[in-house]
Image: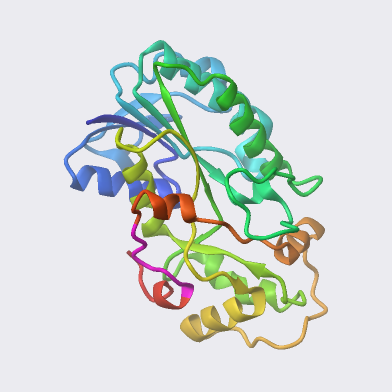
Amino acid sequence: MKVLVTGATGYIGSRLLQTLQAAGHDVKVLVRNHSDLFEGVEQVVGNLAIPDSLDNVTQGVEVVFHLGGGMRPSDGDVTVVNVDGTMRLMQDAINHDVRRFIYLSAAVAYGDISTPPASEETVCNPLPGHAYAVSKLQAEQQLLSLTNHKTDLVIIRIPQVYNAGSPSINRFPQLASMVEGKNITHFVHREDVVRAILMLANADYAPGVYNVADDHPLTVRDAAAIINKAVGNVEISTPQQVTIPPMLRRVMEATLVLDTNKMKRIGFPLKYPSLEQGIYHET
């Protein structure tokens, strides 16, 4: 299968690329500039921050795995990258009769979920001022407006992604010590995200929106204790008087529990059903 991967240097994209190559797929990656990181892989130059640079990048491709995007100011304007860049990429995919477009979105688009768990039909309400979450939802909405009979669209919403040793998960206990931590949140292992992405690339499964998460959401404090036991570097106690950016605090204090029955109905088997099972595994 000939595929295009965006975000191939990222945390999830790099693992997806490895898995696709190991399975013998014909892979090309979207890059800003040619890189020695992708020796032996076809590279196509384009930049999500410059939508006009994306013309014809999907030519000859059967499936697009769109994992690229921006989260921080250093990534560029998140609206341009995550919305305008995504839309130009999808339009190019339609122009070139790409069979399926997989868009990796984010569960933060749901916001602070008042009546958990949130299903794919739950109305999204990103936290006000959360530019990344707002941009991911806007991208979803605009992609859905382009849905056509030629290119199927799959949108995958994921919560906090982890594997053993990932910097973001190692930092979680420290952040958790700065909030009350009674709210419930969800996790998913990186390997299960990659497996879900690959499964949903198959034409046997209907296009649409899918939540991908493990089976055991946890309070923030309980999750921090599990992680701390694995990494052994932060004592979890009462909230600390340490500065935490206001938006990050609101994200840490939000309830984020996903209904994953849609994935279960199509027979997706989690490799790591809980944080406690997955935290010790890199792959």
Residue in the picture at 38% in, 68% down: 272
Instruction: Choose between 121 and 222: the one closer to the eye.
Output: 121
- Magenta residues (range): 269-275
Tell me, yes or no, if residue 77 can be seen here.
no
Residue in the picture at 42% in, 19% down: 93
Q: Quadrant of residue 150?
A: top left
Q: Give the percent coordinates (x, y) of residue 254.
A: 73, 62
Q: In the image, 98: left or right of 161? A: left
Quarter of the rendering occupied by the N terminus: top left
Residue in the picture at 43% in, 74% down: 279
Magenta span includes 236: no
Instruction: Choose between 87 and 260: the one closer to the eye.
Output: 260
Q: Give the percent coordinates (x, y) of residue 86.
A: 54, 27
Tell me, yes or no, if residue 30 can be seen here.
yes
Marker count (numbered): 0
Q: Give the percent coordinates (x, y) of residue 130.
A: 75, 46
Q: Give the percent coordinates (x, y) of residue 164.
A: 41, 70
Q: Main secondary structure of the magenta part?
A: loop
